[in-house]
Amino acid sequence: MPPARHAVERTAYHAATEQERLQASLSRLAEAFPGDVAIAVQRVDADWTVSVNGDKAMPQQSVSKLWVTLAILAAADRGELSLDETVTIHKDELSIFYQPIRKLVGEAGYTTTLHDLIRRALQQSDNAANDALVRRLGGPFAVEVAVVGRNLDGVRYGPGERTMQTAAAGLTWKPEYSFGRAFWEDREALPQEKRKAALQGYLADPPDGATALGIVGALARLHRGTLLSPDSTALMLDTMAGSVTGAGRMRAGLAPGWRMAHKTGTGQVMGSLATGYNDVGLVTAPDGRVYAVAVLIGATRQPLKARQALMSAVTGLISGASAPATGDGTADEEAAPDAL
């Protein structure tokens, strides 16, 4: 019998697709980062998605301002309100943490338009401006109704800034928390175990939780124009493109010629533990390709520059930047303690 002949199998070379390369690279990034992280990227014009921990609910913090503006614009589309309508904010209606509009609120209050409040909420991440929009809608439940009504799977709004932030710190809302250092003083006076338990409870089941996949799905639908009227869609995207927060996050990783419309979020810090550090948005290539991106860091003990480096690395991979830049915290919401 002739000796057996060993066949050599030849496998055709398979060039990895953009989707496959990005999935592998994002998996490596997330695995190397010490902390609770979720990442999702959807190629809007090609309808594919990659993710790491994409279906895990993460604290949104100020990312949730997107859904408030969405609800306001949807109401405007239905003719229930006008963006030129004026609203007066009084001192007892101020919020907590970052709210630059506060300096304009005198004894008679401060009157401005809904359009201006949208700009302040999305571009400056102003909590008092966002709270005024929520009040105009009828409260947090109205925002939740808008989210559910548009089938934004994996996204929820929560009880609002004042209630949520004080509960996450182990406190109960008091009006004096809108001014000075009262909130920080009361928080620091709490027993450490009580404060830790409150923050861990928030992280375990964030009332403002959203999945990275849910967020990029919603952003993709926003870009396609299926959530709002053409005018409202353009207004929201243009306003997001003018955001001045998070310069060291995703924006820092973009290659020249790429554009981004985005919203950041930043949660509370306890010792070295940073929570709810996020950036989400729509990234557009010079040739018109569009990607919906969400990078959500639920909790980590990594310093600011490491968190920024993770986010800029994601957009660097998408845009092909050879060496994504890292920020120094300038123009980032963390320029102020617990700013959101």
Image: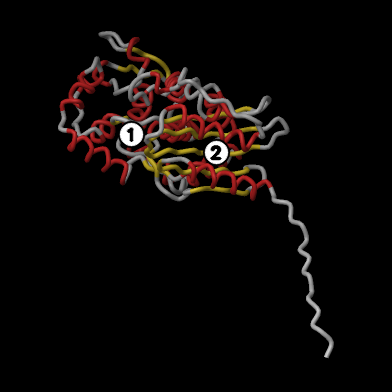
Image location of residue 150, percent across then percent down: 47, 45
Residue kind at label 1, given as amino acid type = Leu
> Position of 176 compared to 17: left or right?
left
Q: Quadrant of residue 109?
A: top left
Vertical relation: 7 (above or below) 114? below
- Disc 2 is placed on an element classified as strand
Image location of residue 161, percent across then percent down: 31, 30
* Circle 1 Cα neighbour tier, 10 Å, few/some/many (<14 / 14–19 / ≥20): few
Mark 2 vs 1: CB contact within 8 A: no
Instruction: Give the mark, 2 or 1, whose residue is nearer the N terminus.
Output: 1
Image location of residue 21, percent across then percent down: 64, 47
- Disc 1 is placed on an element classified as strand
Task: Give the camera-side residue of 120 and 9.
Answer: 9
What is the residue that sits farthest to the right in this orientation?
2
Give the residue pinned by disc 1. 273
Nearer to us: label 2 or label 1: 1
Q: Quadrant of residue 339?
A: top left
Q: Quadrant of residue 189?
A: top left
Image location of residue 234, percent across then percent down: 58, 29
Q: Quadrant of the C terminus?
A: top left
Vertical relation: 213 (above or below) 99? below
Q: Residue at x 70, y 51 (%)?
A: 16
Q: Quadrant of the N terminus?
A: bottom right
Give the residue pinned by disc 2. 293
* Circle 2 Cα neighbour tier, 10 Å, few/some/many (<14 / 14–19 / ≥20): many
Q: CA distance from mark 2 to mark 1?
A: 24 Å
